[in-house]
Amino acid sequence: MKRDAGRETWHRLLEWDRSSADSERLAAILLSMEEEYKGVDPSHPLGGPDGKRDLLVMREGKLWIGATYFPRGKKPFSEIKEKFTSDIEAIKKHNAAGFVFITNQEVTLSERYALKDSLKAECDIFHLERIAGILNQPKGYGMRLEFLNIEMSKEEQIAVLCHKDELIERLIAQITKLQIGNSDSKVGHPIEVVPEPIKDVASYSLGISSNINFCSQCGFGYKVKNDPLSMRVYSYGEGYSITCPKCGNIERYNKPLI
């Protein structure tokens, strides 16, 4: 029977019964999902000399070494520390700026401090609770199914839909913000537009009272450039058509530009 409240993920991670290659691949995907880590590059998941580096990764433009430790069942802290201490030797060997340790073991807060204090470099630890928390989020459901064979519950399916709705709302808000930003030229720095001469002025009654114009369709503001050639054309009895640079709406005028 599946445990609830995220405990199933926690227990299956702790009782890891898959290969070391699977643990290294899981670790690589976990790091790829975190924004601060870039260019994750696994070494030899299927075996081979890796110089105590299961993967390489960039963080804040600096090289970090990654190592995994996924034994089956709970291990004493002394064994976790022994593995950690062995793996950090790769930092000096490869002149890395930091070390990320990915393990399916419980590591308490005080134990994390103890591990980090033993290292004279930057360090990040992905421990059991942290990994389970990632896999129990919508972004981790697919990875959880692949590596732990845990399907989504009804509650998690609802969570996925809500997560998708939030993303859509966020995108709409960003698009709206961009549109508002573009319309700021009404009062900020108007775009200069050179009018084109038109004929049949009698059929148009619109006029221009200023060289700052606002589109009658979208309200976008733009500056009508006083072009000498266009003014001369008007003197021959022709008007002007001005295309809004934002929406393409064509405004027609039969009065001189000021």
Image (cartoon, rainbow, N blue to C red):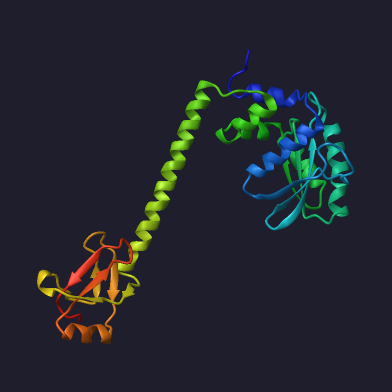
Residue 43 vs 230, above or below: the answer is: above
Quadrant housing residue 202? bottom left
The residue at the point 30 percent across, 63 percent down is 248
Location of residue 212 in the rendering, given as x and y in whole percent from the top left corner:
25, 74
Quadrant in the rendering for residue 60? bottom right
The residue at the point 81 percent across, 48 percent down is 119
Numbered label tally: 0
In the image shown, does 239 or 96 lie closer to the viewer? Answer: 239
| Depth check, front residue: 247 or 239 | 239
Q: Is residue 149 above or below residue 30?
A: above
Image quadrant where one finds the N terminus: top right
- Position of residue 11 in the picture relative to residue 246 (left or right): right
Residue 152 as seen in the image, left or right of residue 128: left
Residue 41, position as x, y percentages in the image: 75, 47
Quarter occupied by the C terminus: bottom left
Closest to the observer, 105 or 20: 20
Relative height, residue 251 to residue 168 (above, below): below
Residue located at (33% from left, 67% from top): 245
Question: Residue 31 in the image: x percent, y percent?
Answer: 68, 43
Residue at the image point whose x is 66% and y is 44% from the top: 32
The quadrant in which residue 186 appears is bottom left
Residue ranking furthest to the top = 1
- Residue 32 is left or right of residue 111, and the answer is left
